[in-house]
């Protein structure tokens, strides 16, 4: 039981088109123990909720809590009904009587072995209305029964029915073998017996299942009530059944006919638990885990045409927001038909595992999981819930020719994966998990799809439509009737179509075949568009659709699209029919997101590119210094990223490199001075290449006075220099003052240049030629 409800608990309101009533389930007697046994994965908790009884020939003994005989995953404490000692008779009863008349499912795992002599005698699961101190004989009596054979001296437990797991052959008339399961009741309230004369039916497991092999075995026992008495060979026997499934094997296909009310129940409840015995032989007889799920009691409500408000049925005290002890509610309101009916609704608590097995028996729902309601099975008992809808006496609440349609609803709390307790795995309550950044914020599974389903089943018994077909081949749940589901931190709602007939309903999540679909026509996946293009080809075209069988279909789903939107990155949101972005060159991702009326989300992303012709930028010139490193960066724009090349003669020691990222680098240490006219080009296959003329000037230091001058120099020269014919003397950032001579008699021309007029001054002469 929870001390307080937290924000991690969620409240859901469910409504669907059908017929629903309400039910009140038994609540826990006292705050210490859960309403029903829930020893899973072992008996570490709530040990005081069991009353133990036992006798031993040598000393007083009773069931104990002990480590398992062999290490088992997740099991640290077991209920040891007998140790491997002789002469035991034991019983262990859950202190809170359980509602059994309306049906139940109980599942337990057990391990028998470690004998010190030989394997014996076995254990039993027993339903009895005698007392918490009830105990039968040990040895062949297995703690619940007597025997006319003399192998058990005392009388058995009165007002009881036992499912016996026998491990020793006590002779003809008592046991069919050393490995068998038998259902024992001597008729009504008569003290029970292990004799075959009191056996309703047995299954000899010889050669099939060895109960004392030391392995863990799992048994599931189900009682299914029926109001019919048309079964059996004569057609006059009750149609209520007990069934046992052991290690996945149905030991009594179709069940064993038995009316549990004949054991003399006080109301509809009885004590449930285990008995065991040893005699000359013995075993450690351990129960490793045990859960018991009673079906709900029924309530009746009147549904009338023209109701302006729904009929409300409170289950487990009804729904109270913010209360950890809250139950849940059911509502019903007729829609478009005109029948007035008394509707009986039975809420059937069932373990999530057992419920999911019923659902997944249909391959259409092989991934679906049953929703777990907070306090679904009573205070402190979170379970899945089946809702059984009937209209006595016929059972059916309508037909194809005379349908009965109503809008039904339920409000309930539930917990998610990260909550304490962790339930409804893998649902996440909160923001969607990565990589999903959109969609319904409060209910998402690991893949962003809650896929809430509202499944409809119709078993062969019109009075109990949640009872599966005994042929074992026909799945109970055949269709998903969901059409809306919404959820918030405090409220929400869902709807589904009933089909107008009696029904069994269950709420699921991770229900396949609910994924909304997306179609993207434009932009075309992988297409390339030109920069600034705006024409018919650049208009967004996309659509979303939900899974919908159509209004005329008797089976759903009937989902509709709640939202359908697209986002262009880079760019912004884009409506279908609007221009998508072609103003930003480069790759784009175009994502369409859809959410349907049941909060299922989906997304689809395609990519496209916007191509742009190349453009080139950078300085038109640069000056390097001889023997000193220099660098210039040239930049290209466009998409795809342009390649960069250089044309023209470069000085030794200087090179150009395309960095393959839209930039190029001219760098190095020039070996000699000079002026180098070159150009750069950018091209990417889109449009024409772009070019940039460029002049690289490499300068040396100004020569000393009286020396020869040949090259490009930085600064102003003062003094006398000699320029040999065929040579050039260029000064950058300065000039020449003083005397300038060219070598006489040289037929080749020679010159002195200064980019700044007026700096060449003073006396200078040329011998045998023309002077400047």
Image (tube, rainbow, N blue to C red):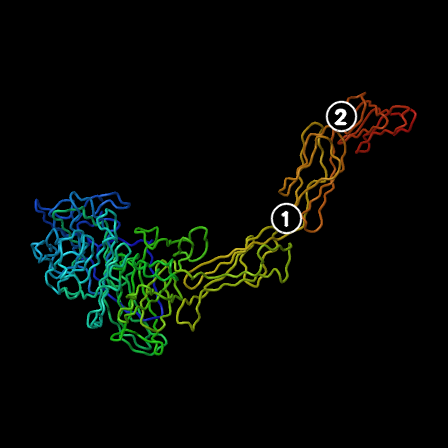
Mark 2 vs 1: CB contact within 8 A: no
Q: Nearer the viewer, mark 2 or mark 1?
A: 1
Image coordinates of residue 84 in percent, x first then y, are 16, 44
For residue 398, above or below residue 256: below
Identify residue for label 1.
640
Using residue 737 as the reference point, say whether residue 31 is left or right of it. left
Image coordinates of residue 441 in percent, x first then y, are 41, 56
Mark count: 2
Quadrant of image for the C terminus: top right
Where residue 445 sits, quadrant-wise, is bottom left
For residue 121, above or below residue 458: above
Depth check: 111 or 414 in front? Answer: 111
Using residue 594 as the reference point, say whether residue 676 is left or right of it. right
Where residue 410 sits, quadrant-wise, is bottom left
How far apart in space, not on screen, are marks 2 and 1 (Cα)? 47 Å
Quadrant of image for the N terminus: bottom left
Identify residue for label 2.
702
Going from N to C along the chain, the mark reached first, 2 or 1, is: 1
Image coordinates of residue 717 in percent, x first then y, are 78, 26
For residue 613, above or below residue 385: above
Which structural element holds mark 1?
loop
Depth check: 321 or 227 in front? Answer: 227
Which structural element holds mark 2?
loop
Residue lying furthest top in this view? 706
Image coordinates of residue 730 in percent, x first then y, are 79, 30
Q: Residues within 10 Å of mark 1 (few under 14, many from 20)?
A: many
Where residue 354 sits, quadrant-wise, is bottom left
Depth check: 459 or 271 in front? Answer: 459
* Residue 434 marker: none
């Amino acid at each position: 039981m929870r001390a307080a409800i937290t924000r991690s608990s969620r409240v859901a309101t469910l409504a669907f088109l059908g017929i629903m009533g309400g039910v009140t389930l038994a609540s826990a007697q006292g705050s210490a123990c859960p309403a029903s046994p829930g020893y899973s994965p072992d008996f570490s908790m709530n040990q005081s909720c069991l009353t133990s009884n036992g006798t031993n020939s040598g000393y007083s003994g009773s069931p104990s809590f002990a480590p398992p005989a062999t290490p088992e995953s997740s099991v640290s404490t077991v209920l040891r009904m007998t140790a491997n000692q002789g002469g035991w008779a034991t019983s262990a009863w859950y202190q809170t009587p359980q509602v059994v008349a309306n049906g139940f499912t109980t599942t337990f795992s057990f391990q028998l072995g470690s004998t010190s002599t030989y394997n014996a005698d076995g254990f039993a699961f027993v339903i009895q209305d005698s007392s918490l101190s009830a105990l039968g004989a040990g040895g062949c009596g297995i703690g619940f029964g007597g025997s006319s054979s003399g192998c058990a001296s005392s009388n058995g437990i009165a007002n009881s029915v036992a499912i016996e797991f026998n491990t020793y052959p006590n002779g003809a008339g008592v046991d069919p073998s050393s490995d068998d399961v038998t259902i024992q009741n001597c008729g009504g309230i008569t003290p029970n017996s292990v004799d075959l004369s009191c056996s309703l039916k047995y299954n000899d497991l010889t050669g099939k299942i060895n109960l004392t092999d030391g392995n863990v075995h799992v048994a599931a026992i189900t009682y299914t009530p029926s109001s019919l008495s048309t079964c059996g060979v004569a057609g006059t026997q009750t149609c209520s059944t007990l069934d046992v499934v052991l290690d996945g094997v149905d030991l009594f296909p179709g069940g064993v006919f038995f009316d549990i009310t004949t054991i003399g129940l006080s109301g509809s409840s009885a004590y449930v638990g285990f008995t065991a015995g040893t005699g000359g032989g013995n075993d450690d007889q351990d129960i490793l885990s045990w859960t018991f799920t009673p079906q709900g009691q029924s309530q009746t409500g009147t549904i009338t045409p023209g109701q302006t408000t729904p009929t409300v049925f409170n289950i487990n005290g009804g729904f109270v927001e913010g209360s950890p002890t809250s139950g849940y509610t059911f509502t019903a309101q007729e829609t478009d038909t005109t029948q007035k009916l008394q509707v009986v609704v039975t809420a059937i608590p069932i373990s999530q595992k057992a419920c999911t097995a019923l659902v997944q028996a249909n391959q259409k729902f092989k991934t679906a999981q049953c929703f777990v309601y907070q306090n679904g099975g009573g205070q402190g008992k979170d379970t899945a819930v089946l809702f059984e809808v009937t209209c006595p006496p016929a059972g059916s609440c309508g037909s194809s020719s005379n349908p009965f349609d109503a809008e039904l609803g339920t409000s309930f709390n539930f917990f998610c994966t990260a909550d304490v307790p962790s339930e409804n795995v893998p649902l996440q309550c909160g923001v969607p998990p990565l990589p999903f950044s959109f969609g319904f914020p409060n209910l998402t599974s690991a893949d962003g799809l809650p896929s809430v389903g509202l499944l409809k089943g119709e078993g062969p018994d019109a009075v109990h439509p949640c009872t599966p077909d005994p042929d074992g081949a026909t799945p109970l749940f055949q269709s998903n009737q969901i059409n809306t589901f919404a959820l918030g931190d405090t409220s929400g709602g869902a709807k589904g179509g009933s089909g107008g007939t009696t029904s069994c309903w269950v709420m699921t999540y991770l229900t396949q075949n609910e994924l909304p679909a997306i179609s993207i026509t434009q932009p075309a996946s992988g297409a390339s568009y030109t920069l600034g293009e705006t024409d018919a080809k650049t208009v967004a075209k996309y659509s979303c659709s939900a899974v919908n069988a159509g209004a005329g279909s008797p089976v759903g789903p009937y989902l509709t699209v709640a939202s359908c939107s697209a986002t262009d990155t880079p760019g912004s949101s884009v409506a279908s029919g609007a221009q998508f972005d072609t103003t930003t060159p480069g790759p784009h991702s175009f994502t369409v997101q859809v959410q349907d009326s049941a909060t299922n989300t989906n997304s689809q992303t395609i990519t496209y590119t916007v191509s742009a012709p190349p453009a080139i930028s950078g300085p038109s010139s640069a000056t390097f210094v001889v023997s000193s490193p220099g660098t210039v960066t040239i930049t290209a724009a466009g998409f795809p990223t342009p390649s960069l090349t250089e044309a023209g003669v470069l000085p030794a020691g200087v090179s150009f490199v395309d960095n393959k990222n839209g930039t190029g680098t001219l760098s190095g240490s020039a070996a000699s001075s000079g002026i180098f006219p070159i150009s750069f080009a950018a091209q990417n296959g889109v449009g024409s290449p772009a070019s940039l003329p460029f002049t690289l000037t490499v300068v040396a230091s100004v020569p000393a006075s009286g020396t020869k001058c040949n090259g490009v120099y930085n600064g102003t020269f003062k003094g006398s220099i000699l320029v040999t014919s065929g040579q050039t003397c260029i000064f950058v950032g300065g000039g020449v003052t003083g005397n300038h001579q060219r070598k006489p008699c040289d037929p080749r021309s020679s010159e002195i240049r200064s980019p700044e007029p007026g700096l060449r001054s003073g006396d200078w002469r040329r011998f045998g030629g023309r002077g400047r």
